Amino acid sequence: MPRLSRLASLVFSGCLLAPLLTLAVAEERPASSSQPNIVVILADDLGYGDVQCYNPERGKIPTPHIDRLASEGMRFTDMHSSSGVCSPSRYTLLTGRYHWRSRLQSGIVGYLERPLIAPDRLTMAGLLQQHGYHTACIGKWHLGWDWNIPNDQRRLFAPGRNARPQATDEHRKVWEAYFAEPIGGGPTTRGFDTYFGTDVPNWPPYCFIENTRTVGIPSTFLPQRLVGNNLASINGPALENWNLEKVLPTLAERAAGYIAGRAKTRQPFFLYLPLTSPHTPLAVSQPWRGKSGLDSAVADLIMETDDVVGRVLAALHTSGVAQNTLVIFTSDNGFAPYTGAKELQARGHYPSGPLRGYKGDAWEGGHRMPLIARWPNHIAANTVCNQLAHHADLLATVADVLDAELPATAGEDSFSLLPLLQGSNQPVREHAISHGSQGLAALRVGKWKLIVGPEGGGAWSNQSATRPDGQPAQLYNLADDLGETKNLYAQHPELVEQMLALMDKLVSNGRSTPGAPQENDVAVNWRRFMKPAKAKQP
């Protein structure tokens, strides 16, 4: 039976911390039948208030399967992603390292961009591989590939967001030659035995990718009716008659099939299921159109997403492995306001619940995420954890479940959640950092939150009304003001200086966990959004 806790005696400033010991590589050992299967389901753009059990009074979209998962396990109320957008959050979830220690200082991994995760960086999948697991990624990757498209041919793959392209013989000739070859740098080079997905569902290539090859050879462009209007964002190489509505159901089928197949073996498995929804394209399958009753495609898609979660849980049950499977459900960032936030609020549904902000923001609505964990006989049913936690913590948690020791060069910002999952109410981390999409940093220390700039830091924020007092940064007491309405920056200068000094230390050390200092990949200019306070008018 895996050791359930080795943290109880380690106390640091009143908090329990997961130790990271300095080793060259993670310890390897043969797989054991007592090791749990692990399934991580990552929704895309699902807001804190989009799940009924997180927003019972102002949430109008039914999510029965996610709610049932919460009733059978533990629901975290203070869980955070590394960023208000997807690529950086995915990086941190898989590596246990804040994304801003990498080259990605703002935004996301761009179209046809190189891999973000370094080839030698240990991921959750790589750790589990070392401990005898079969590992699979099914869904949206969005962490880059080695596309290796020559510069003089890139125009044939990226005609521009506003173009109305027509595939020519030149396009088809180049595409046929390129997509006939394997694509490097993807999930199977970052710890996964298998991959199946669409990489980014609203970007080309519009086809599935299995392991290192496209399933079929793109030969055309998408019809223009499928570009824009919260469907595809960029036109580019596509399979003939590519169907956006079938992407999510296909991922569900693949996930259920993977579980059924692996359950027949004695080898434990890890399934990372980064869903494509409710992110754009808002392509809702026919059975779910109009189901929400809110006249909203994104609300219908949230219901369809919940159904996919139900199908995965049903597959675990039917295959007889539910009792020995740790299931974790979460989202990468907050709700995308451009998909209809105002319209939903007018109908009584608040996608961020009680939180300020949405996708992209350094305010809580951008990065405070639902996270639910179920592990029968290990996690008590229908429990709630209010302690501060972060997506980065999943790597150390998995290592603790395996009784594994992480190298000094892995999981630099990852604290084990296992004591909390066992019922402890002592904090496992004293602080956490999340960013807005443009790189604006927010530091949590206990109840205090410092946003190191005057605005929201998101590409879709309404910035015009966020700096009425002329302060260079924002300080909130979340215990009294979860909605971040009262900026206390001017009232607590000593606390602000202490938090700025802590931020300096966390950045310069290259890690926030105990252990040998590490190097960030690039210089990190986290103060760049702070501006001098405006002088008061006489």
Image (spheres, rainbow, N blue to C red):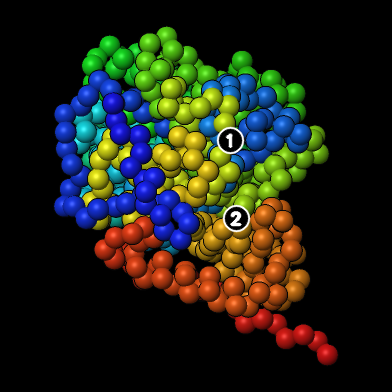
Q: Residue at x 29, y 60 (%)?
A: 515
Residue 64 image position (x, y, % from top left): 62, 21
Characterize the local packing of mark 1: few (<14), some (14-19) or many (20 or more) Cα atoms within 10 angstroms: some
For mark 1, give the secondary structure: strand
The residue to which callout 1 is attached is: 384
Front residue of this view, candidates 305 and 510: 510
Q: SS at mark 2?
A: loop
Front of the two marks 2 and 1: 1
The residue sitting at the front extreme is 9
Q: How many marks?
A: 2
What residue is pinned by disc 2?
361
Q: Is residue 328 above or below residue 476?
A: above
Q: Is residue 494 left or right of residue 113?
A: right
Residue at (49% x, 40% y) in the render: 424
What residue lies at 41% left-to-right and 54% top-to-bottom?
11
- Quick one: 177 or 299, which is closer to the camera? 299
Image x and y of residue 32, in percent: 22, 24
Q: Quadrant of the C terminus?
A: bottom right
- Cα separation, mark 2 vs mark 1, equals 25 Å
Residue under the image location 29 percent in, 52 percent down: 20
Tell me which numbered mark, 2 or 1, is placed earlier along the sequence.
Answer: 2
Q: Pick out the residue farthest to the bottom.
A: 538
Residue 392 visible in image: no
Quarter occupied by residue 26: top left
Image quarter where the N terminus lies is top left
Q: Amino acid at mark 2?
A: Asp
- Give the percent coordinates (x, y) of residue 5: 36, 39
Near mark 2 (Cα within 10 A), the count class, few <14, some 14-19 or many ≥20, is many
Rendering quarter of residue 404: top left
